[in-house]
Amino acid sequence: MSDDVLVYLRDDLAVARTPDFQNGSVLVDEVSFSWREFCRALLRSTAHAAPTITARPRRHEMSVLDHLSAWHEQQDSVSPVHRHPGGSTLTEVLRWSARHHAHRTAYVTLGSDGRETDRVTYGVLDIRARAVAVALRGIAEPGARALLVLPPGLDFITAFFACSYAGLIAVPVPSPSGPFGVQRQADRTASIVDDCTPSVVLTTPDLAQRSPTRPIGAGDVPRLVPRHVDTELSEHWREPGYDGDAVALLQYTSGSTSAPKGVVLTQANVTENLAAIAGGLGENAGASTDFTGVSWLPPFHDMGLAALLLPCFLGGRSVVMSPLAFVMDPLLWLKSIDRYDARFSTAPNFAYDLCTDRITPQQRNRLDLSRWKFALSGAEPVREATLSRFAAAFTGCGFRQSAFLPSYGLAEANVYVSGSRRPGDTRVIHAQADALESHGRVLSATAEEAIRAVVGVGRLPANLRARIVDPETNRPCPEGSIGEIWLTGASVAQGYWGNAEATAAAFGGRLADSGEGPYLRTHDLGFINDGQLFVTGRTDDLVIIDGRNIYPQDVELSVEESHVAVARNRVAVFGWTEGVDTRVCVVAEIARRYRVTPGTETPPGPGEVSRQEITRSVRNAVSQTHQVGVSAVVLLKPGTLPLTTSGKVQRGQTRRLFEEGALNVW
């Protein structure tokens, strides 16, 4: 009897070919039926064996008992996966769209004033990508790394796809001319260059002329300017000849908890993740031609790159603006969503707060957000108050709170892990604070009890599986308990570039009792309730005081709300031990419209507030809400709290600067 089943995936059908698979097993020569029916039939008939299923064209090998059993058990709680009809690589995706939607607009770019600066069709983008790919192949061999030092726009989009067309590994990094500043990114870019050793740099005409000592890095590595490549070269392009297992890009982590590491993502990792997002949104890959997404997120960041690629994966249109344009005028983002009838846009927590705080009622009255169907919020953490404030402020514009899709992801899983919802899914759990902090248990709170609001971040797709595991014992946590989130599945990365030790530690998780694995250990804490994932914090940031688990983001929210002068989403809290006592240290950035005065002897003038007043408010809020002491309150000048390139607070770096006395304080 054969031990193998060959499954050809055609759209949503499975074609199973079993040359000699009898004796109580599935008996099929070559029959098409639904994937769900196939899995059920195969599971019923293979209880005595563990054959291998080879799925093509993705060529993923899966143990039936390890993976399909898990799928079968969870099929009612996961979201579907909508794969692309063109294939499992980015090259196949764009080539398919170029054949089927050649004259449809693929990308539109906007200037700092919100006006269009350029647009490109799928057909023209394919020609440009092929031309640049030919130029790249004249410089580097397949598998070499290509550093992308480009601002958001068509040059970046062309360069990224050209790397795929040429079989090179794309390495997006921040542009020195971007909003994150030359000096701020110099060390990070230099470390990435040292780590990945690129063979070519794709960049702008200006940066291409800079000396090797400038922050573009990469020494004497050849530079290539995509816009200067003659499109006639496209005629010399040849298929790269790789499959979904080829490495597509190195996605460097943002560094919120450690130095950036290069996450190795294959072509199939990327397309499977896009297929998961498509399924979660209920969109059809390659066929959602009326789909429009608007993004201002930096493309070198995982969320920004996914937002850039998703409309292309669906066969729709992507409208791109720069992060600086959004920060300078948040209204441009919402006006673009209105103008282009976008139904998808994603942003971290602070972006929604910024819109609520800075867009006036008169400006809101001129917006129509009724067609914005998917407002993803991927943040650390997703805050109930932020979503409620934004929905209340923009409900008059047609925005529906049901459009919010709080989601969870990380670079090591490409980006997207969960976010899909079903009607009736719980959006927020109000848990007993004591049970959460002292016992790691999730219990519903009564009106009289102290509560912690935990926002649900949706259901996982069918091509990912999560386990909640005790990080100390590596044993599965009982239902209703908080543990570390472990992941396995099609979009989980291959590891860290050139770092076997870190790869083994992060991607080699195995359950203590059964040895089941390997799993990606996310270092994020959470629980699953009724099929939906809830994230409570990070193991690296947890502060333990008198046996209680204090989640810094909860304390940070209390600090933000304690005084009007504290800037939103600009607070870092970490543990600080003095003698034998551990308390929390609070580092808070002051909003730009305020100036901190040293004492109370002179009454503060307009726009001024005394240091003692803010400190007293912070200490009272933390003590009353969380019943913990505060060792120090440090007030920073605007724009000086350490953040990642995606806007996350760097608590570890803030602590190091605090210890060194290097914070920019009032």
Image: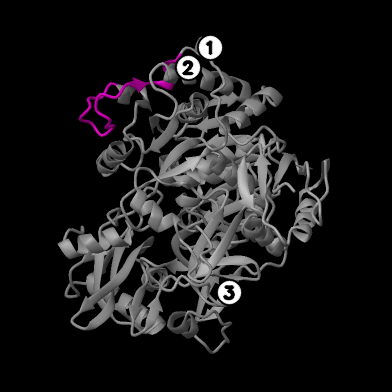
Q: Position of residue 177 (x, y in %)?
A: 33, 34
Residue 469 location in percent, x, y?
A: 50, 70
Q: Quadrant of residue 563?
A: bottom left
Q: Count the marks.
A: 3
Q: Which residue is mark 3?
A: 429
Magenta region includes residue 157: no
**Amino acid type at mark 3:** Ile
Name the residue nearer the viewer: 297 or 462.
Answer: 462
Callout 2–callout 1 Cβ contact below 8 Å: yes
546 or 45: which is nearer to us? 45
User: Residue visible at 43% across and 33% down?
Assistant: 170
Callout 3 environment at 10 Å: few (<14), some (14 to 19), or many (20+)?
some
Question: What range of the chain is rendered magenta?
Answer: 209-229
Q: Amino acid at mark 2?
A: Val
At 20% from the left and 57% from the top, the residue drawn is: 664
Question: In terms of sequence position, does the residue under pointer 3 or pointer 2 come before the other?
Answer: 2
Cβ atoms under marks 3 and 1 closer than 8 Å: no
First in sequence, mark 2 or 1: give its number: 2
The quarter of the image holding the C terminus is bottom left
How packed mark 1 is, by other alpha carbons closer than 10 Å (few <14, some 14-19, many 20 or more), is few
Q: Which residue is mark 1?
A: 236
Q: How far apart, in angstroms, are the residues tagged by discs 3 and 2?
A: 53 Å
Q: Earlier in the sequence, mark 3 or mark 1?
A: 1
- Badge 2 is on which residue? 134
Task: Name the residue: 43% across, 73% down.
Answer: 473
Q: Secondary structure at mark 1?
A: helix
Name the residue rendered at 48%, 30% in the picture.
160
Report the Cα–Cα distance between label 3 and label 1.
58 Å
**Residue 234: where, in percent of width, then height?**
54, 14
